[in-house]
Amino acid sequence: MISAIYTFAMTTGANRVVRGARIEHVCGDPSLGSEKDYAYGMRIVGTALQALTVAVPGPTLFDPQAEETPEAVHAS
Amino acid sequence: MRLELGSFPVRTIAFGPATRWADGRLTVDKAAALAEVRRDARIASADLEVAAPGESVRIWPVRDVIEPRIKVDGPGQCYPAICGRDVATVGQGRTHRLSGMGVVEVSSVNWHDSGGDFVETYLDMAGPFAAMYPYQRLQLLCLVVEPDPALSDESRNDAVHKAALAVSDHVARATISLTPPERETFELGPCDPALPRVVYIWGVHSPQAMSGSLTAFCTATYGLTQLTAPWLLHPNEIVDGALTGPYRTAFAMSWTVANNPLFLDLCRRHGRDWSFLGVIVLRTEWTTQHEKQMIANQTAKTAKMLGAQGAVVTWDAGGNEFIEVVRTIQACERLGVKTVFLTSEDDATDGAPTMLEPLPEADAIVSTSFFKNVTLGVADPPPVRRVIGLDRKVIHRGSGVGLHGGADSALPTSGTLPPPWRYDDHYGFGTLSCIE
């Protein structure tokens, strides 16, 4: 499950949870401009697809922003 | 900060040659009141009507119910800063109120055009549906008002609420030189240090995220509705209307905020049963996990810094806003601030929890029953003899979530109508609770 409010997804039992951007735009960030927005969306979707290939013991968070700099994380 | 609140009970309202209050009878000079409304060039039409408890009358669409309050002594203006009013800090001196009545803002103007937040509330003055709300017991002065349709959403909201406040001011002004038959003093005086210290964390929806505007109309703190850091208010400021204005449920109205029984009890029992430290207004509907957690942490920190040992928590919304509210409760408990949560419940379809995120720290909860009329099984209110406002109401049938989907149709307002889909008693006006 891709969710901006990812702890809720986890406490209610989703096994693979991908951190989304914001409630208004879960899979992207229009404030980045179309090119970066697209890249960001692709990274979220890519993380989600990757998550499907991993065995998990229980609710687990996959964070597409984990390798980003702090500035990029806060850009949304 | 000391505030004396003088109450003038209203038992009847009638139109007459001059606006005056005497022995529970409010007479309203309709032409004079409407002249004050029409002073704003944005108003296209305005009329006043009266509704009394027990009458077979339906009022639709109801945006707000306002209790007339006016400053007699002390700085500022009641219901400050909203709709361009005085921004001076309120809460001192003397305020007069017309109790037992409300000015009803009857208008088709919607809050904003996104997110499914439509004006849905109508009021019946008789019958079992009416008994579910506090307004059925009030004398109501209804302003049926429409602005210039060419204006923006925000300008139309501002215009009709300003108009309702103009009527509220007009009738309240009649009490300025009179001696109030009832008086009450609000003051957080020194008290026994052994008494438990409590704050009230008052969650209020922000329309900022849904509307995309910093200035969208909603319940406002000194006129502001945007997402802000937790805001500490002296209770007297709230008595003077620093937190005011309607939102989408019938329980989120100016009148219910001003008459919130939980808040008034916290004030009245200060120095006897506890030491009331103040109100922290928590704006809700932050839209990332991190923002929600941060605002929960900061709200709890503020309570702790004030020296709180306990906090009472309410909110006025639904859905994802539950997260910052319940995480505020968690953060308070982790800092040693014990919490009590007053909330309605979501439906328990297919065994889902009636709380969106049931955290173990939220272990003292007072339920005000279900959020939705459909879950409560409220019967369709029967036809009425008279309608104040629009003669047709668009309804959305066949949808499990109220407005979002289903077939639309417009029914005569005077006929049998489904109840508005949200019930949601935010402050404990009613007697409904949970099913064990």
Image: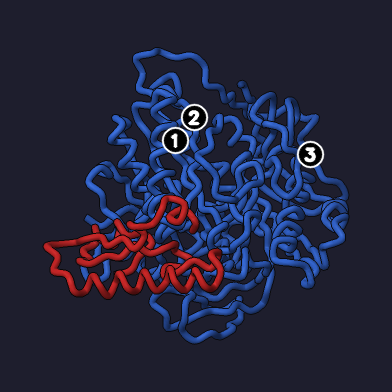
Chain colours: A red, B blue
Real-space CA distance between mark 2 and mark 3, rounded to the nearest whole angstrom = 29 Å
**Residue drawn at (38%, 57%), measured in percent from left and top?**
A68
Question: Which subunit holds the residue at mark 1?
Answer: B
Which sits earlier in the primary sequence, circle 1 or circle 3? 3
x then y, percent, for residue B185? 59, 24
Disc 1 target residue: B200
Q: For this view, does B234 lie left or right of residue A12?
A: right
Tell me if I can see residue B78 in this picture. Answer: yes
Amino acid under disc 3 = Arg
SS for callout 3: helix
On whether disc 2 and disc 3 are found on a single subunit, the reply is yes
Q: Nearer the viewer, mark 2 or mark 3?
A: 2
Disc 2 target residue: B278
Where on the picture, by quarter, is residue B353? bottom left
Question: Which subunit holds the residue at mark 2?
Answer: B
Amino acid under disc 2 = Gly
x then y, percent, for residue B87? 72, 37
B41 w.r.t. B418: above or below = above
Real-space CA distance between mark 1 and mark 3, rounded to the nearest whole angstrom = 31 Å
| Label pair 2/3, CB-CB below 8 angstroms | no
Decide which of B297, B424 is in the foreground and name it: B297
SS for callout 2: strand
| Label pair 1/2, CB-CB below 8 angstroms | yes
Disc 3 target residue: B173
